[in-house]
Image: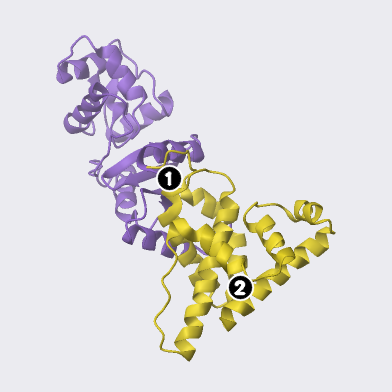
Chain colours: A yellow, B purple
Amino acid sequence: MSSVALPPFWSLVEVHGDELLVHARRMTGDANGEDVLQDALLRALRAYPRLRHAEHLRAWLYRVTTTTALDHIRSRRREVLTDEPPAAVAEPEHYDDAFESIIGALPDGTKDALRLRFVEDLEYECIAARLGCSTVAARQRVSTAIRTLRTQGIAA
Amino acid sequence: MTLSARLLDSIASAAIREGLADAVYTRLDTPIGKLLIVQGERGVVRVGFPDESVDALLAQVAGRLGPRIVASDRELATTRDVVSAYFDGVDERLDLPVDLSLVRSDFRRSALSLLRAEVGPGEVVTYGGLAAKVGRPKAARAVGSACATNPVPIIVPCHRVLPGGGGVGSYGGGPELKRLLLAHEGATVG
């Protein structure tokens, strides 16, 4: 059992489930959003007792959902195009590394925006303040970054 | 929350199938209000009255069984049916596996186990009488604490334990509820 007092998992699903589904749909399309969310939440459950702290759980769920969505996009692409065997799925405890490697190729400014949103769990007002831009611009930067990720996933 | 019930059910069932859930909970409409029922691998671990905080009860279970707690009416269908059968008066035995791991001492655990095994629907026992059954005839007060902290009320029938001096005594869900449950079971209270 975990040494930190983690909230019951389902309370996270109740509070953040809706926005995670929106995020999954935005990355993988309306038809796949629910499958991706289910997969992401099961991955999150596997890793949950091993979390070392109970902070920024929402951002953590976003990262797991992002990683799962990209795996989904890549495996779909592979099914269509090649016979190559699927790459090993990241072990749950390495989701943070997986997230960093996913965003690694993006320009620095874009990476910063994604980290502020999905690692530091900041609202757009705070992201705007950190990036020195307007809230609208911050929102745009994150959404452009997600679009870039999605296209990269498809192109990978 | 607007995630579809179908998706939530599907996620919870997959989690249980893969052995990823430390506990599963459901909320059941009954004549006494919405009960919370939490079940672990070994049986029902917690029952919460309608006026108790669901978050607090689930946090208590998480502290003991682990934080991977999911909700599913479907996975707990059998448990729901058995509890509904009790309130409908169809079958009052509440024959369900129970996990007393939230009980803090061995004495309390044996008192509650014995109560469940030996005092059936329609029957009552005094605090002192139950203490004697456990082999500690002077421990009526300790039996009272065991009942007051019973994590699985109704299924472990602490409402059937009464003060020796008459009346229904106290109850976690309130004395009115205790009286109601006893009347439902057809027990005579002095």
Figure quadrant of the N terminus of chain B: bottom right
Residue drawn 25% across the image and 42% down it: B94
Q: Is residue B50 left or right of residue A124?
A: left
Residue bearing mark 2:
A27
x and y percent of residue A3 in the render?
Answer: 42, 38
Q: Amino acid at mark 1?
A: Pro
Residue bearing mark 1:
B67
Q: Chain of mark 1?
A: B
Q: Amino acid at mark 2?
A: Met
Q: Chain of mark 2?
A: A
Residue A141 in view (yes/no): yes
Q: Residues within 10 Å of mark 1 (few under 14, many from 20)?
A: many
Q: Nearer the viewer, residue A101 or B142?
A: A101
Figure quadrant of the C terminus of chain B: top left
Residue drawn 62% across the image and 61% down it: A19
x and y percent of residue B186 in the render?
Answer: 27, 32
x and y percent of residue A138 in the render?
Answer: 78, 61
Placement of A73 over or under A93, stated as above or below: below
Q: Is residue B62 left or right of residue B53?
A: left
- Alpha carbon distance from label 1 to label 2: 29 Å
